[in-house]
Amino acid sequence: MQSTLHQPTAPTWNNFLKNLLDFPQSISLSGVMAGFLLVLINYTGPILLVLQAAEVGNLTPQQTTSWVWAAVVGNGIGTILFSLLFRQPITFPHSTAGVALLVTSIAYFPYEEVIGAYILSAVAISLLGISGWFGRVMSLIPQGVILAVLGGVLLRFGLGIFNGLDDHAYNPIIILAMVITYILLRRVRFSAPSLGVMLVGLLASGALGMLQLEAVPLTLAVPTLTLPRFSLDATVGIALPLFALAMSSQYAPGQTVLLANGYNSPINRILGLTGLGSIGLAFFGGHGNCLGALTAALVVSPDAQPDPNKRYASAVMGGVWHIVFGLLGATMIGLFAIFPKVVVATVAGLALSGTIANSMGNALEKPEGRDAAILAFLCTAGDFSLFTIGAPFWGLLVGSLVHALLTSYRNTK
């Protein structure tokens, strides 16, 4: 971690305008490209998960387009506002772990109840920020258990890389080409391996005659308002795990990424503001936008802008790119609709493989927490529903109970 932490500017209207006026002098070509890579990675990874969840939940094309609009345009607006407000590279992506959770649980609830769960999760995040209890809440659930649940939620996407091997005669060729490409790009430390993997998958599919190209009209995304309905089942099955995963997989590592790059960001204010923003986006299908973590490193690092005081401009450019792509959400969905399923599944699996490895590695790091972590992982990976409540909640419950029992037992010895 850097010895000198860059302090945020006070969140006032005058400072916002000052940072906006300084933007042209702060932006660099590398910052523009870093912002562009940020949106490309989003569209070649996390957004594919949104489309999968929408398909599982039998959402209409209008509802799916609105969800993408909320996730991507909401990301752009939030990133621009927060970065200009605090003069720090603060990004506002949708929760990747959250949408992975929804792939396994959205089908069990009416869409209106799902929207209600989004709102409750966002309200809890906002209240947590206002109260300043972020650290206290994170200490209630063992970190190893939360990481294991995240690994269990994402496991099905990793398995998706190979589950389609026997679905089509050409699938093994396509999957092999994509996996080799991913390994090579990782070997040379290419910043957007998912983009290269997707391009190779499309080229291989086209060469094998599996890519059915169709004309995709240039259409602006139109958000669709959905009024929420609240239920205990959706609160327990979606809102609670969504909240826990956002805290552990977005806010906690996001704060770490910022600190590691010299930014002492106001985490409680960020929680409060992102929670409020997510409440508004939920009415249009947004499942929750949070503090950027892994992909945020693209605009937070010195590669985007050597001067840390000007690096906020790189995040602002990322926000601009997200708004442009998000407004064309319907067109982008149309483009992705022509992708063979094997390409989508392999891109998603490879894009999340690193997160799965990191989650499980950290979850099993401490020997005294392995029993609780592995049971939480296996329970979550079971992908079942009990009393209409999805496996992630039961994984959190089982892991926390086992951890409490084992900890209590060791303390009495």
Image (tube, helix red, strand yellow):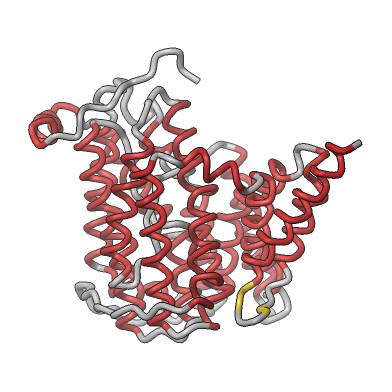
State the residue at coordinates (87%, 38%): 412
Residue extending farthest to the top is 3
173 left or right of 272?
right
Q: How many marks?
A: 0
Q: Nearer the viewer, residue 396 or 190?
A: 396
Q: Nearer the viewer, residue 47 or 376?
A: 376
Q: Vertical placement of 339 versus 4: above or below?
A: below
State the residue at coordinates (38%, 74%): 115
Residue extending farthest to the right is 413
- Can residue 320 be seen here? The reply is yes
Q: Vertical placement of 316 versus 242: above or below?
A: above
Q: Vertical placement of 356 versus 105: above or below?
A: above
Q: Position of residue 78 (x, y in %)?
A: 26, 50
Q: Please identify the quarter of the rendering in which residue 9 is found.
A: top left
9 left or right of 242?
left
Q: Position of residue 85 (x, y in %)?
A: 20, 37
State the residue at coordinates (50%, 76%): 232
Q: Please identify the quarter of the rendering in which residue 167 is found.
A: bottom right
State the residue at coordinates (70%, 68%): 162
Q: Position of residue 263 (x, y in %)?
A: 37, 26
Q: Position of residue 281 (x, y in %)?
A: 29, 65
81 left or right of 250?
left
